[in-house]
Structures are given as structure tokens and as C-alpha cells.
Image (cartoon, rainbow, N blue to C red):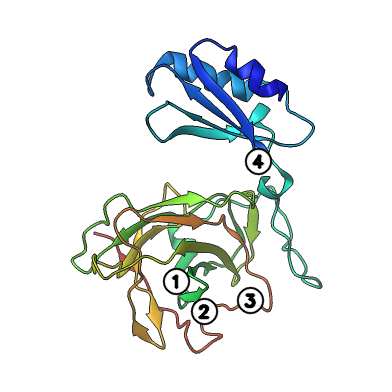
Amino acid sequence: MQLAVEAAQQPNVANAIFGSGSLSVYSSAADDSEQTADIKRWLDAHEPLSEPTAYTLSSPDVGTIFDGWIGRELPDHLMAKPPVLPEGVTAWPGDANAPTCTQDDLKLSLSSPDAALGSRFLSLYAHNVSASACSLQGYAQITFLNADGDVQDDAVTRPETHVSAERIVVPSGEYAISTLNWKAMSTSQDPDETTDLSVAALPNLEPVVLTPMHQERPTSLDILDGARVDLGPWVQAAEGWSKPGESSGSGERPGSRAP
């Protein structure tokens, strides 16, 4: 394919192969070199093809250094879009003058964890307990803690790619929701599970410690060292979606101040 020929002609490219709808490029320079970074910049700046095309950039003797899309053109299913409410649910009114939610405006809580086909799910709720509407935009800040209260090493959240972080105005008494999704992790060799989450609703707010609950009892999560947890932005918790106290497993547990 012409793209592979063009890539192979770039400085410091050892080889370029097109197959299975994607481009594999091998750099002859060091992984962290400016020369390899130049190859990535060329791939990102290239005119997009007729269909979004993925690439990987590696050196000949190691794994992938970078991956991305030619010309930064993503396929439709990876493009972040505003969340869609269920049919018949009215979006909360927007108010450009609504202030950003403060520490005292919100009470945070967790749903009961759920599982399906090797995936794990958990919802985080922000209940507007103030007398007026306030706004949220973006992502909660979450740290995973083990039974000793220590931070799980290299366990981090990463933004969901298919939902954009839109500004929402949360009416008094309503709930905003953010979702956590991760792959099941084996605890046979590493039983050091997450027992608490330190959560700040927004980066500039003080975190509180929340304990996952199942059937009104504390439960642990198979989030271990090195976990990658997909985190959704704050969105409107619509009617028909489980909210704290609405199902037997999702009792609300007040948060305590994080140490």
C-alpha cells in the first residue's frame, strides 16, 4: 500500500508494513529519541485516508512505543459524544450562571459493584444536597486504597473515550452519576484488594473516603496494583437508572474525610 511506501521513506524508519487494515512502523532510532518522536508526528500529521486507519510505532526489538490513528482521524465508535438520555427523559435545564458545585453542595456515595463477562462495574453518585442548582463538568479524582489504607501502586483511572465531558447543571436534590469499569483481576497471587476509594468530585475539592457496599455490608473490589479503570464523566442520573437507596444492594454510605 502507498502509505507503507511513504512511511518507509521517512528518516529513521527501518520498515513499514500494512496489513489487516492497519500500519506497523518500525523505528531504527531509540524509543525515547527525537527521531522516533518525529516519525510519530509525521503519522499524526499525514492526510487521513478514506477510512480511519490505525498505526503502531515500534523499534525492531521491543514492543509498541506508540499507537494512534493516521492523521488523528478516529473511527466513529471511538469519537467522544455527549451522553444520550433514555427516551422520555427530560434533560435538566441548563443555566450558564449556575455556580460550580462546592464541597458542601455534594454528598458522594457508591452503588453496589456489579459484574458481567469478566468486566466489573461501579457507579459513583454526587447528590446535590444544597438548596440551589450547581454545575459539574469533567471527572472525579479517585485513589484506590487497600485494607491498610495504603494507595494501590500504579492503579489509575483513565477517561472513557466514547463519552465527552459536558457541563451539567444539577438541580437541588438530584444526583449526578459517574461510572467505573475495569477488567476482572486475579487475586490468587495478589490478594491485596481495594477496600475503599478516596474520591474528590472535582480536582479542586477535598476527597472523602467511600467504602463499597453489597447487601449493606462492606465489600472489596478486585482492583489491584497496576489496575486501569475506565472512568466516565459526570452525567445526569436519569429516571430508571439505579440511584442510592433504590435497590437492595446499593445502600448509601456517607463518606468520611480522607486522611
Mark 4 vs 3, N-terminal side: 4
Q: Which residue is mark 3?
A: 241
In what element is the residue under mark 3?
Answer: loop
For the residue carrying disc 4, how many other residues have a C-alpha within 10 Å: few (<14), some (14-19), or many (20+)? few
**158 above or below 134?**
above
In what element is the residue under mark 4?
Answer: loop
Q: Nearer the viewer, residue 22 or 230?
A: 22
In the image, taking residue 148 as reference, residue 87 lies left or right, namely right
Q: Quadrant of residue 32?
A: top left
- What amino acid does circle 2 point to? Pro
Mark 1 or mark 3, whichever is nearer to me:
3
Mark 2 vs 4, N-terminal side: 4
- What amino acid does circle 4 point to? Ser
Quarter of the image for the C terminus: give it.
bottom left
- What amino acid does circle 1 point to? Ser
Q: Which residue is mark 4?
A: 20
- What amino acid does circle 3 point to? Trp
At x 25%, y 56%, the residue is: 151
Q: Which residue is mark 2?
A: 244
Q: Position of residue 54 (x, y in %)?
A: 63, 36
At x 64%, y 51%, the residue is: 162
Q: Extreme left residue here?
A: 148
Q: Position of residue 168 (x, y in %)?
A: 65, 55
In what element is the residue under mark 2?
Answer: loop
Structural distance between the alpha carbons of marks 3 and 2: 10 Å
